[in-house]
Amino acid sequence: MEEVVRREMTAMALAMAQQQRDVAAEHVLQVRSEVGEAVRSELQQTAEQIQGQVEKFEGALDKGIGRFEQGVDKVLASSTGSSVSEKPEKAEKGESRRKSNAEKADRG
């Protein structure tokens, strides 16, 4: 009789241990899933912030390039005595370049 009780208690202990392992495995999967979602969310937010900063930088760069091109045009115009009709043409090229850069940023 004593041997039967020992076997049953051993079987019960093994079953409980297996149940604990199963529950622990479920918790690990749940935690991994939650951590993965949190990391993906943070990465998405960071990517959006970086994209915003890149767009600001590109805008500032475009403005700076535009001012530089205008300055170069003024210097060239004053040193060569070129006509006024050349300036709008160069301004259009600069604007076209800025639009092209903006379109690339939108696609990226």
Image (tube, rainbow, N blue to C red):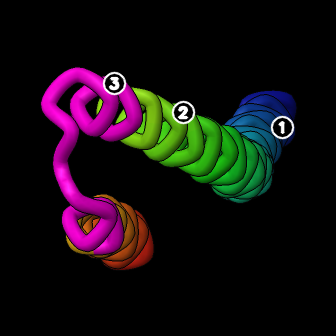
Tell me: residue 97, above or below residue 36: below
Q: In the rendered image, which residue does mark 3 sit on?
A: 75
Residue at 79% across, 30% down: 6
User: Closer to the camera, 50 or 74?
Assistant: 74
Please identify, in this view, whether the residue under mark 1 or under mark 2 is nearer the observer.
Answer: 2
Q: For numbered disc 2, what is the local secondary structure?
A: helix
Disc on res. 64: 2
Position of 34 compared to 72: left or right?
right
Q: Amino acid at mark 1?
A: Met
Q: Quadrant of the N terminus?
A: top right
Disc on res. 102: none
Residue at 25% across, 72% down: 85
Task: Measure how far apart labels 1 and 2 are at the Cα level.
Answer: 81 Å
- The answer to whether residue 76 is magenta is yes
Q: For numbered disc 1, what is the local secondary structure?
A: helix
Residue at 70% across, 51% down: 52
Q: In the rendered image, which residue does mark 1 sit on?
A: 9
Tell me: residue 9, above or below residue 82: above
Residue at 54% across, 33% down: 64
Looking at the rendering, the stretch of residues picked out in magenta corresponds to 73-88
Q: Quadrant of the C terminus?
A: bottom left
User: Closer to the camera, 47 or 99?
Assistant: 99
Q: Amino acid at mark 2?
A: Gly
Q: Amino acid at mark 3?
A: Val
Q: Is residue 39 visible?
A: no
User: Closer to the camera, 104 or 46?
Assistant: 104
User: Closer to the camera, 89 or 98?
Assistant: 89
Query: Quarter of the image holding residue 95?
Result: bottom left
Tell me where residue 18 appears, x and y as whole percent: 66, 45
